[in-house]
Structures are given as C-alpha cells and as structure tokens.
Amino acid sequence: MRIDVVTIFPRYLDALRESLPGRAIADGRVSLAVHDLRDWAADRHRTVDDTPYGGGPGMVMKPDVWGRALDSVVADAEEPPILVVPTPAGRPFTQAVAAELATAPHLVFACGRYEGIDQRVMVDAARRLPVREISIGDYVLNGGEVAVLVVLEAVLRLVPGVLGNPRSAGEDSFADHLGGLLEAPSYTRPAVYRDLPVPEVLLGGNHAAIDRFRRDESLRRTAAHRPDLLATAELDDRDRAVLAA
Ligand code: 6GU
C-alpha cells in the first residue's frame, strides 16, 4: 500500500514510524511519504491560508496551494488514489470505512486546519478521484494530523501482513461474531488482584458457560456505554431477556 500525507506539520506524522505501522513501513509493505504543504506556496512567506469570504473567525486554506500539492502527489500514481480529508464536518469514520480504505492500493491524506480547506479543492479533486471527508468523532481538533494517525492505525492493522496476529482483527469490538456489540471485559492472572477476584466462571473449563457469560457482559456493557448500538445489533430472545433483567 502507498500512503501520502500532505500537512503543514510533517513531524506530527513521525509517530507512524513507531509500533505496528512502523514495522510495515520499515520492511516495505507500506510506503509512506509525508509532504510539507508549504513547498507548494507561491510567496516567500510560504503562505497557505487567507481570510474567509463572507467573514467569520479563523483562516481558510488556499485552494491554489492545495491544488498544486495534490496534483504533484498524484502525478506519478499508477491508478487514482482515494483522497481522505479529515474534518469535523465529515462522515463518521467507522470500522466499515477502515475496511474500505484497507483495500485501496493508494491513499492520499490532506490535513487541513479545522476552519478548513477551501471547499473547491474537494469538489475539483472529486472530478478525478474518490474523495472521503471523514470525522473521527464529535469533538473539534485543531487540525487533521492526529485524525490521520487514528485512521491509519485502524486501517493498517486490517491490511494482510501488517498486524502481527491475523486472528485478532476479526475479534475486536464491532466484529461480526459479536453482532455489533462491544467486547466483554478481559482478565489474566492473578486470580485475585487487590481483593478483586476474576469472575468464577472464567476459572472453570465450561466453555459453553464462558461463552454465555461473555455474551451477557457484552450485552450489559453495550447497554451501559453504547445504547445506540443495540438498535442495530443482532439479538436473539435470550439476549433480550438478559437486557430486560
Ligand atoms: Cl477528522 N479533523 C478535525 N480537525 N477535527 C476533528 C476531526 C477531524 N474529527 C473530529 N474532530
């Protein structure tokens, strides 16, 4: 997979060279290029933003600078990449979006400040490329850089050969086998930690009872933390009885 990131803060992306993504980059399964947007500025102050038409606070990133940057990054691409634009005004970033991006051979990320990039940059790019404006949650970040770190960590662990244990990807929260519920809590030794015992059922070898216990904990945790997920979760009559109790 090829990844290009365009940003005014290239060093923010240094964190990608750590950990799991880092190993994939180091041994060539992922090629990462981070570009400084200011390299495409037109003046000696390397200006990338200007005041908003129509008034209002903050600054808007200039379309001509972004246009040159994206043209240049895409110029030598073998096929049209997906352009990912992190913005609090985007569609929600979900595991399904991560899975879609994980199948792409080439991703380009455009990091803007939160007041945004002139919208015509995305309109123009969409004439040639799939464009995904995505938000990582209902809060405001100053810029897209940290969102790119989040998105890439979620995406790269789905690319075959990037995650250490290929079984784990399907076993996390939102995995199919949980039918859209949160994962049950986890425990390891010791059996008693500061007066707190591990749930008794997990110490026995009754795997049917363990599966039922974990299902119940998933249901209760989802009801407590993410009741919105219950609307689309796959529930049977026993599940509904546990939730009603
Ligand atoms: Cl993707 N970008 C910014 N700047 N702020 C955000 C966000 C993204 N997602 C939530 N807040």
Image (cartoon, rainbow, N blue to C red):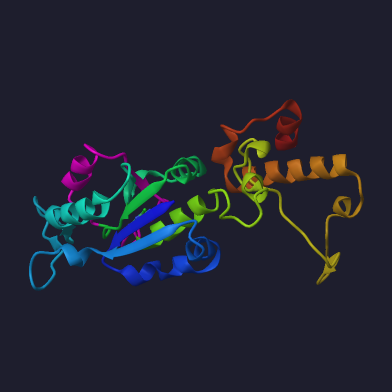
At x 52% / y 60%, what residue is drawn?
24
At x 26% / y 54%, what residue is drawn?
73
- Whether residue 49 sits left or right of residue 78 in the image: it is left
At x 31% / y 42%, what residue is drawn?
80
- Give the number of callouts: 0
Classify 72 as above or below 94. Answer: below
At x 47% / y 62%, what residue is drawn?
25
- Whether residue 242 sits left or right of residue 38 in the image: it is right
Residue 77: x and y, percent? 30, 48
Q: Which residues are magenta?
A: 115-144
Classify 138 as above or below 21. Answer: above
Of 221 and 82, nearer the camera is 82
Ligand 1 quarter of the rendering: bottom left
- Whether residue 137 sits left or right of residue 70 in the image: it is right
**Per the image, is 141 magenta?**
yes
Asked where in the image residue 120 lies, by quadrant, the reply is top left
- Whether residue 44 sits left or right of residue 222 in the image: it is left
**Per the image, is 60 magenta?**
no
Quarter of the picture holding the C terminus: top right
Residue 23: x and y, percent? 53, 64
Residue 233: x and y, percent? 61, 33
Q: Main secondary structure of the magenta part?
A: loop
Of 113 and 43, nearer the camera is 43
